[in-house]
Image: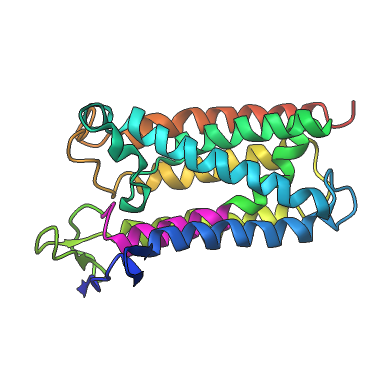
Amino acid sequence: MLMYPTIDPVLLQLGPLKIHWYGLMYLCAFSAGWALGLYRARQPGSPYTPEQVGDLVFYVAVGAVLGGRLGYVLFYNFPTYIENPLAIFKVWQGGMAFHGGLLGVLLAVALFSRKQGQHFFASTDFLAPLVPIGLGFGRLGNFINGELWGAPTTLPWGMVFSHVDELPRHPSQLYELALEGVVLFLLLWWFARKPRPMMAVSGLFLIGYGAFRFLIEFVRMPDAHIGYLAFDWLTMGHILTLPMLLFGAVLMTLAYRHKDR
């Protein structure tokens, strides 16, 4: 059994200015994405030049933050934010939804692609291998904040989150860091090293993330104010992830069906 190492969510305080670990994780995520994007932009067949990557990362950052926050508000905690609308802006307290962030990023990429005269899926194929590293940093931020803990377990690596209760629980944030962050990054980076039909890399990202997230939802506690939606196991995460799996499969099918046309 492991004990959760309680960490102050504030990394540094300078007078009234507070620098939160969660915000630092976002900075690390977008910085890593920028660096990886510069590398990909220098490879043959890249739809973007290194000079365009910075603008693309800016669009993605805005889409991810706004979409992630609005997604959490709409999908997970709408009544609370209706009562206290100003709390929407307190992003350092957590409360970001991946699925909302994904929609925000897709909208941002669509706008950027149109502006640059690029095909939308050429842009998402370029971007997809960069995303998992950012997801990994985000899950590390969840762990530091001591949020999104897992269900009780008897496994030897069960972790006691003493601010929750004294039960050993799945450290589901670390599961997600490992699978959605490290494993998905390695898979996509390997897959994208060779030329692939348009939409294939994007499809693999949706399938990979969707599969990992769907599995982890079985050991991750749902938000207390939502609970399980059915069968004592179906969560909002399951519901929101299913379309990703289906759409990813459609993209992969279309990509390889039309690759020689």
Work out whether residue 61 can be spotted.
yes
Q: Residue at x 61, y 30 (%)?
A: 107
User: Is 35 positioned to the left or the right of 79 in the image?
Assistant: right
- Label the magenta part by its dominant secondary structure: helix
Q: Which of 33 and 88 is in front in this view?
A: 88
Q: Which residue is drawn at 39% across and 64% down?
A: 19
Q: Which colour scheme is used?
A: rainbow
Q: Does the magenta stretch include residue 146?
A: yes
Quadrant where the N terminus is found in the figure: bottom left
Percent of width and height locating residue 150 = 25, 54
Quadrant where the C terminus is found in the figure: top right
User: Is 187 positioned to the left or the right of 121 in the image?
Assistant: left
Q: Quadrant of residue 68?
A: top left
How many circles with numbers are drawn on the protein?
0
Q: Which of 35 and 128 is in front in this view?
A: 35
Percent of width and height locating residue 217 = 34, 44
Q: Which residue is drawn at 21% across and 52% down?
A: 151
Percent of width and height locating residue 9 = 30, 64
User: Is 112 positioned to the left or the right of 227 in the image?
Assistant: right
Q: Nearer the viewer, residue 71 or 82?
A: 82
Q: In which quarter of the image is residue 166?
A: bottom left
Q: Is residue 31 magenta?
A: no
Specify the segment rendered in magenta: 132-149
Work out whether residue 178 can be spotted.
no
Percent of width and height locating residue 95 = 33, 44
